[in-house]
Amino acid sequence: MALQDLTPQLRTRLSRMERAVGWFVVLATAMLVFGFSYYVYNTAKRKGWFKTRAPYFTFVNRATGLKVGDPVMLMGFEAGRITQVLPQPPEDFYYNVYVEFEIIEPNYGYLWTDGSRTKVEADFLGKRVLEVTKGTGGHATYLFHPLHELTLAEAERLDAPEKWLLGADIYDETETNRVIKAMTPLQKETLAVLRQLRCEKFSAFDAREQRKSPTVVWNDQEGRYVKFVPKSNPKENLKANIYWLPADESPAVSERLDKLIGQVEKALPDILDFTNKIAAVLANGVNLTSNLNAVALNAQPVSSNLAYITAQLRAPGGLGEWALGTNGQRNLDAALENVNATVVHTDTNLTALVENLARSLDHLADITSNLNAQVQANTNILGSISSAVVDADDLVQGLKRHWLLRSAFRGKTTNAPPSAPRLASPKEQGKP
C-alpha cells in the first residue's frame, strides 16, 4: 500500500512512530558507543596505556614458558609486561634468547644500577615468570631531564647551579678512583674539583625541567648518562641504548626432572644391591630366631631344675640347716642379736662421750675467753705474773740453802752396785 493511499490520520501516526524509532536507534547507538568507550578507557587504565613506560632487556638461555604479553613481577606485584622474545643471531655464542620488557610508572623508580636484576623462575607446570628485583643503590636507570653538554665556563655562569646535576662519574688521572659521583649538584666545590682535574667539558641536566617520557639512560660501560632514543624496529632494538638487567635463570622443571631421573638411574643398581642385602639379613634373622627358639626349648628343663634347687635351698631342712646343724641357725640368730645390741650400746656410749667432750670444750672455751677478757682488761697482768713466778723461784732457792730446811731438799742416796771383777789374760796371771 502506498503512503499516499493512507488517510491523513494514519500518515500522522506513522510519522510519529518513525520519529520515535529514530530517536530510540540514536539513543541506543549513543549508549553503545559510551559503553564501549568506557570499557576501552578502563582497559587502558588497567593495563597502563596512558602511563609512561621504561624499556629494559635481558638474555636467557631458553624461551620456554615466556611469551609476549606475560606480566613482569616486582615484589609480588605486576609491574610491566614482556614486549619481545627473539632468538639471538647464530653467530652469537654467548647469549641465546633476547627478552625485552617494559616497566610501567612508577615501578621503574625501584630499578637502580646496584641490586636490580632479572629473575626467571619456573613453577611446577613449566610456566616461567619474569621478575625484577628492587635496587639497593647506585644510579637511577632512567631520568626525565633533558641532557646538556656544558663547558666549565658555562657552568660557572649558571644562575642556579645547585639545580643542575652532573651527568657522569668523574674519575682521577688513573681512571680507577671515582672523585665525583653522577647526580652531584654543580656547586662551587664541584666546579673547583672539575677545574683541578682539567675537565673542560662534561654532561649535565637541569633538574627543574621534567619530561613525560625518559630522556636519558645510564650506560654502565661509559659510566655516564646518554641520550635515550626509542626505536620500533625489533632488529635495531638489539642495539638500542635501553638498559640491560642481567638475568638469574633457574632451570626448567623438565630439566630438573631429567637430572633427577638420571640420578635415580645411577643410584638404582646400588638401591637394588642394598635391597638384596636387606633381604639376606632378614633371612638370616629368621634362621637366628628359629635357632633361638630351639635353644629356649632345650633350656626349659635346666631352668626348671635350677628353680627347684633354689627352692630346696630356701626351704626348712635345706643346705643351710644341713651345714650349720640343728641348733646352728638358732645360735647364729642369737649371736647376731648380741652383736646388734653391743653395737647399739656402743653407739649410745659414744654419743654420751662426744657430748661430754663437747661440754668440756665449751668450759675450756669459757676459761680461755675469761682469761682473754682479764688480759684485755689489765695489760700489766702478764708482768705481774712473771714477777710473781720469779719471786717464788727465789723463795724456793733460799729455802733450799737455809740450814734448817736444807735436809728436806737433799736427794736420796742409794748403795752403788758392786763392781764386776776384771778378767785377766793367762799371760797377765803368769801362767806359761
Image (tube, helix red, strand yellow):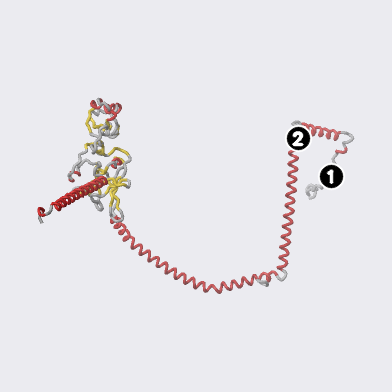
Q: Is residue 160 above or below residue 319?
A: above
Can residue 271 be seen from the camera position used here?
Answer: yes
Q: Position of residue 176 (x, y in %)?
A: 28, 35
Q: Amino acid at mark 2?
A: Gln
Local secondary structure at mark 1: loop
Residue drawn at x 88%, y 36% as measured from the top left: 405
| 35 relative to 399, above or below | below
What number of labels is visible? 2
Q: Secondary structure at mark 2?
A: helix
Quarter of the image for residue 389 reads top right
Which residue is identified by label 2?
374
Residue drawn at (50%, 72%), measured in percent from left and top?
295
Name the spot of residue 252 as percent of width and height, x first: 28, 54
Q: Looking at the image, is 395 positioned above or below residue 87? A: above
Q: What numbered label is drawn on residue 416?
A: 1
> Of 63 and 107, which appears nearest the observer?
107
Image quadrant in which the N terminus is located:
bottom left
